[in-house]
Image (tube, rainbow, N blue to C red):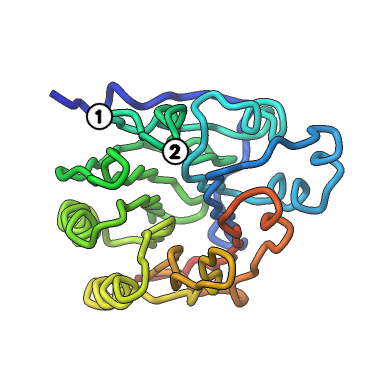
Amino acid sequence: EIRPENFLEHIAGNYSVDLNQDKEISLIVWNLYMLKKIDITKFQQSDLYSKMLNADILLFQEIISKSSFTQEALGLEDFYFTQIPYLKIKRHKIIPDSINNGLANISKPKPLSTKLVIGKAMDLADGTRSVALISNFSIQNSDQILKVIHVHNGVSIFRTMNLMKKLTPEITAHKGPLIIAGDFNSFLLKSKFVKEWARKKKMNDSNVSTPYKFGVISFGQLDHAFYRGLALSEKVKVLKETNYLSDHIGYSLKFKILETY
């Protein structure tokens, strides 16, 4: 039996910053698959590192559990980590060491609660399950709760539908500000399905534009960020400096919390 709570890992830094009704909330979302070996010192002098340290919430997909990137390159001093190793049923035939890849919700404020939602069906392509890591945050000067649903879907649309169905009660029951973001693996026509699903849940589309390319071939928009009960402060910013580190391009978002929703 798979018990979601058994897979959660918590690493606490000296988090002390709360989300504030009167200030912007900044997020960075990035899939670290195929993260290249980096020079830690050089990375910590980069503009990308500064952007990460200034963000309130970081959502990373396909990190290596207890990886050097999160512990050495990023540092733990000002963040609270909730992460999971990937739920591998079998080792990938092409990438056998990928068994520890996982999701991480990294935030300056400590979440009120966290929850792992696991898709029922397996992806035959890679042996993983679609997963969502949910964090709830209190907001200063407000009685609202911000819910952040961090998603990594399998390749098949049936796996995506399965996870979306499981997430529906979380979305329907929550009355405060809500963000759903991550790697939906929405190759080609699947992106249309994901956007339509979000629209029916009365979510706004931030219109992330980081199409996944393999050589000259484009596979469409794999990454998405949807929201409600918030106002997007500025257009999504593509972090082009992430392109040389991974096969996915990271992006940042800034929101203002609406006083009532």
Q: Percent x, y for residue 159?
A: 21, 54
* Residue at the image position 39 percent from the left and 62 percent from the top: 177
Q: Percent x, y for residue 93?
A: 36, 34
Whether residue 241 sits left or right of residue 71 in the image: it is right
Task: Name the secondary structure under disc 2.
Answer: loop
Image quadrant where one finds the N terminus = top left
Q: Quadrant of residue 43?
A: top right
Q: Percent x, y for residue 259?
A: 45, 69
Q: Badge 1, how many Cα within 10 Å: few under 14, some, many 20+?
A: few
Q: Amino acid at mark 1?
A: Ile
* Residue at the image position 62 percent from the left and 76 percent from the top: 234
Residue 190 in the image: above or below residue 116: below
Q: Say whether marks 1 and 2 touch (CB < 8 Å).
A: no
Residue under label 1, please give it: 89
Whether residue 120 sits left or right of residue 206 in the image: it is left
User: 159 or 70: nearer the eye?
Assistant: 159
User: 161 or 201: nearer the eye?
Assistant: 161
Residue under label 2, please give it: 111
Q: Badge 2, how many Cα within 10 Å: few under 14, some, many 20+?
A: many
User: 78 or 119: nearer the eye?
Assistant: 119
Task: Name the secondary structure under disc 1.
Answer: loop
* Residue at the image position 44 percent from the left and 46 percent from the top: 138
Closest to the camera, between mark 1 and mark 2, is 1
Q: Amino acid at mark 2?
A: Pro
Q: Percent x, y for residue 220?
A: 44, 73
Whether residue 75 sits left or right of residue 178 in the image: it is right
Disc on the earlier residue, 1 or 2: 1
Image quadrant where one finds the C terminus = bottom left
Whether residue 93 sits left or right of residue 124 in the image: it is right
Where residue 107 is drawn, which disc sits there?
none
